[in-house]
Image (tube, grey):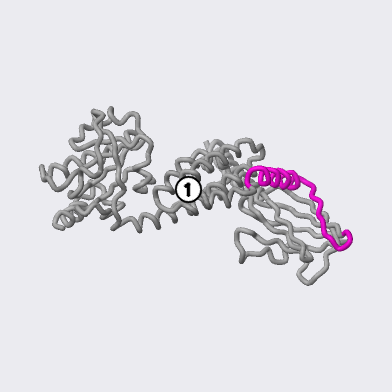
Amino acid sequence: MRTAEALEKIMMTSRILLFTVLATLLVYYSSAQRVTDITVSGHITGDKGLRLIRNSRSDSTFNNTFLNTGQNLYKARITIPAPELITLAADGFTKVLLLAPGFNLEISIHDSAGVNSIELSGAGAKLQKDYETFRDENMSSYDKTFRISTHTERTKLLSEKLALTDKIVTRQLKDYFCYRIIGLSIDLSADVFQLNENKLAWQPAFTSIAESYLKKHLDDRYNIKLDSFLTAMNGRPAPDFALYDTEGKKHNFSEMAGKVIYIDFWASWCAPCRVESGYLKTLKKAYGNQSNIVFVGIAIADINWKRAILEDKPDWLQLRDANGKVAAAYGVAGLPRYVLIGKDGKVADHNAPAPSKKEELTSKINKLLKQ
């Protein structure tokens, strides 16, 4: 019996040791994949020598990155989270490089009659060549054209350029250009409608990005932009809409003018939405048949919405936002989502309490009804 217990302890210790070793190797492997080795050969003069400058962060320079190993040979090992543009500066000579983790690069600097030129080799050289080819063929005037275009034109350009990235073989290069194209559309969106309509266009490409760092950075940029728009939405006229109910009858926002409106954005696949529907039934019953308040459910791009309505039996107006444009105009980024509109037709709360938060919600509604 003791022998069996001892054997079990040995096996347990072995499993723990194996797990520790595997975890250590995983951490090492992950960090190693974020490293890029750069070797520069050539005669470097001047006080500043060789420098690497991150283009995306003007105040961030890789100080003392290069080690002079003698005989005009300089080596650097840098850690970057994802593919990004970095400028190599030496003797007043600069070269913009696309560096990516694991794509080591060898650079030879030649001085001919006072004119510097460089020659690239290694895995990073192929990446740089492909980057410059795609940039020159497809992106040379994109930023400028995108900036001066109308929103409709921008959405078309956005889709066209993202479609072109499907031809890029190297994953890191594809990720970089998707990141750049999507980022520009986020930054230049003029309102919440443009921001979310553009998102409908770039969402598939965003999903395909493998670099988690780039996806998180885009997520952060989008959320910051969305929050700024939504904060400014309160007190402004509510976006108009014209949608159809389950019987095919058209309903306009204007027909609800002069009433307090509580909008419930939902979908059949959204479990929390379906749960909240029960609370909304109770809430609507509490207000009886008051003519100065209306409850509206808007199903977003949902083909199964009618079946869900038959199952849940909501007794308030149900409409369908077939292409998600109304949701985009109201800044709906997740479900469920609720919006309160005052009698004056202005957004009172772009992120109103859910029906389950009865006291908080009724307090807001009652205040609007008294205005």
Relative to the observer, which residue lies in front, 187 or 365? 187
- Amino acid carrying mark 1 in the image: Thr
Check the image and report above or below for 234 versus 18: below
Percent position of residue 330, x then y: 34, 48
Percent position of residue 253, x then y: 25, 43
Q: Is residue 369 left or right of residue 135?
A: left
Crowding at mark 1 (Cα within 10 Å: few <14, some 14-19, many 20+)? few
Q: What is the quadrant of residue 164 in the picture?
A: top right
User: Which is the main secondary structure of the residues drawn in magenta?
Assistant: helix
Check the image and report above or below for 230 versus 63: above
User: Which residue extends farthest left?
Assistant: 289
Q: Is residue 299 left or right of residue 355?
A: right
Q: Is residue 117 left or right of residue 333?
A: right
Q: What is the quadrant of residue 7 in the picture?
A: top right
Percent position of residue 117, x then y: 82, 56
Which SS class for mark 1? loop
Q: Where is mark 1, residue-wise?
A: 150
Residue 119 located within the stretch drawn in magenta: yes
User: Which residue extends farthest bottom?
Assistant: 47
Residue 130 located within the stretch drawn in magenta: yes
Percent position of residue 5, x then y: 53, 39
Image point 72% across, 66% down: which residue?
Answer: 64
Count of numbered badges drawn on the protein: 1
Relative to the observer, which residue lies in front, 111 or 351? 111
Image point 38% across, 36% down: which residue?
Answer: 323
Check the image and report above or below for 33 versus 204: below
Image point 28% across, 37% down: which residue?
Answer: 274
The residues colored magenta run: 112-139
Image point 31% across, 52% down: which residue?
Answer: 350
Q: Quadrant of the C terminus?
A: bottom left
